[in-house]
Amino acid sequence: MTPRALPRVLIVAGSDSGGGAGIQADIKTVTMLGGHAMTAITAITAQNTLGVQAVHPVPADMVVAQMRSVIDDLGLDAVKVGMIGSAGTAQAVADVLEGLDVPVVVDPVMVATSGSVLADAETVAALERLIARATLVTPNLPECDALGGLDALLARAPAVLAKGGHAEGATVIDRLFDASGEVARWENPRIDTRHTHGTGCTLASAIATGLGAGMALPATIERAIAFVRASLERAPGLGHGHGPMGQQDATGFRCPD
């Protein structure tokens, strides 16, 4: 892939009215890493740092219309898929992605940081086609279990980043796997903060931006993890629950020109 100075990243995900996760976190992340963020919003949520109060899925044909609009005019270098909204939308998004030749990062969002459920069983089942199209799938440990476990995921996707944030202990271990086994791992001390809303969205979008810029997978994951950690350390301290991160203050992570 030819490296791009301004990677065009299409984000297919839900909106977070509180600005901590979803589309809002994705746009901040892609922008801070030197990319151009484009969006196809799959659902509108009413949420804040305490939880998700309401979810309104966007009709699948409107999601596809958003995707086609930016693809046909602006083009793209990578795709990040987050909260998908409904089973029908998952199938429709898969139809579009199967016709593209760009890296796709799938973050199988099922539960918000607050614990609110964002995907029903039918939608989880429909994720199968998206996982099969993915360049990389980025589940946390509960999501990995819900999708049948690591071996089952690797039977469908070429690479899986098993995120270790939900495990116990003072060290967070993120592990990259492909069909050959563990490819790389990153061990970092756990950052003691309640302001963790949007970590998964931020990580996946950061990885997609790197892939769109032509970075190798391990290198873009390493940069993405460092960006997430810097964002956690710079969280502005907003809200009474799981507050937003400080992506806007995490500087110095762009690729050299």
Image (cartoon, rainbow, N blue to C red):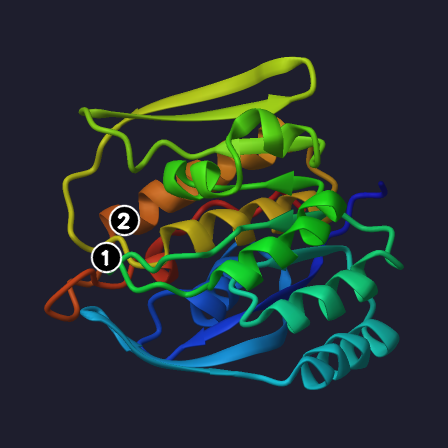
Q: CA distance from mark 1 to mark 2?
A: 5 Å
Residue 89, position in %: x, y?
66, 72
100 relative position to 254: left or right: right
**Residue 72 % position (x, y):** 87, 76
As helix, strand or loop, the secondary structure at mark 2 comes to helix
Q: Could you say where residue 2 lies in the image, as x and y percent from the top left?
A: 85, 43
Q: Residue at x 44, y 71 (%)?
A: 24
SS assignment at label 1: loop
Q: Residue at x 22, y 32 (%)?
A: 190
- How many C-alpha atoms fall within 10 Å of the one at disc 1: few (<14), some, or many (≥20)? many
Q: Against 196, is 12 above or below?
A: below
Q: Nearer the viewer, residue 86 or 70?
A: 86
| Towards the viewer: 159 or 229 | 159
Left or right: residue 80 versus residue 235 is right
- Say whether residue 238 is visible: yes
Which disc number belongs to residue 232? 2
Report which residue position mark 1 lands on.
235
Q: Nearer the viewer, residue 240 or 57?
A: 57
Q: Are marks 1 and 2 in contact (CB under 8 Å)?
A: yes
181 sits to left or right of 186 = right
Instruction: Say which residue appears at 82% left-offset and 64% top-offset.
Output: 95
The crowding category of the residue bearing disc 2, from other C-alpha atoms within 10 Å (few below 14, some 14 to 19, many at least 20), is: many
Instruction: Locate the N terminus and report the quarter of the image it occupies.
Output: top right
Q: Residue flagged by tag 2: what amino acid is it?
A: Leu
**What is the x, y in percent for residue 103?**
75, 47
